Image (cartoon, helix red, strand yellow):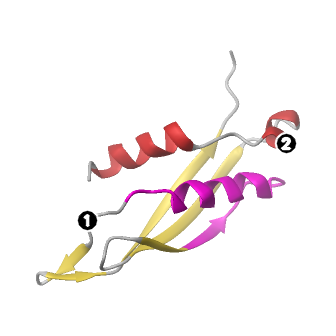
Amino acid sequence: PGGTAALYKHLGQNLIYPETAKENLIEGKCYARFVVTETGKVGKIEIQGGVKGCPECDAEVVRVIKALPAFKPGKTNGTPVSVWYQLPVTFKLSDK
């Protein structure tokens, strides 16, 4: 519920930049994919391309995806079906 905007809001509110990445000034993009099952639950989380040199960043993305609330399942001809979703997550240190 809430669509892509709600998904990114959840990420922004729950994603914690790993301390080791901050200390080592690591930035990058993590590409994750997951399935939304026919019941709306998130499953089968996979990292397709991680942040170079930062497995902690990739693990944080998996943690936050696991904590996503239930989705409205996709439907084909009115029948709920599982749907894969790809999610890019950027880790960027601010210039403040």
Left-right relation of 41 to 22: left
Mark drawn on residue 72: 1
Residue visible at 69% across and 40% down in the picture = 17
Q: Position of residue 78 (x, y in %)?
A: 11, 81
Q: Nearer the viewer, residue 28 or 61?
A: 61
Q: In this view, which residue lies farthest toward the top?
A: 96
Dot 1 crowding, Cα within 10 Å, few <14, some 14–19, many 20+: some
Residue depicted at x 35% and y 45% = 6
* Image: magenta residue range: 45-69
Q: Indicate the amino acid at tag 1.
A: Lys
Label 2, secondary structure: give it. helix
Expressed as whole percent of the image width and height from the top left, the position of residue 69 reads 39, 57
Residue at position x 44%, y 44% in the image: 10
Q: CA distance from mark 1 to mark 2?
A: 36 Å
Q: Can you tell which mark lies on residue 15?
A: none
Secondary structure beneath label 1: loop
- Asked whether the beta carbons under mark 1 and mark 2 sit within 8 Å of each other, the answer is no
The quarter of the picture where residue 52 lies is bottom right
Q: Is residue 63 magenta?
A: yes
Q: Is residue 72 above or below residue 56?
A: below
Which residue is at 67% across, 53% downward?
60
Mark 2 burial class by Cα count in 10 Å: few <14, some 14-19, many 20+: few
The answer to which of 54 and 16 lies nearer the viewer is 16
Task: List x then y, in percent, for residue 23.
Answer: 87, 34
Above or below 13: residue 31: below
Give left or right: position of 96 versus 36: right
State yes or no: residue 49 in magenta. Answer: yes
Report the front residue among 57 and 42. Answer: 42
Residue at numbered disc 2: 20
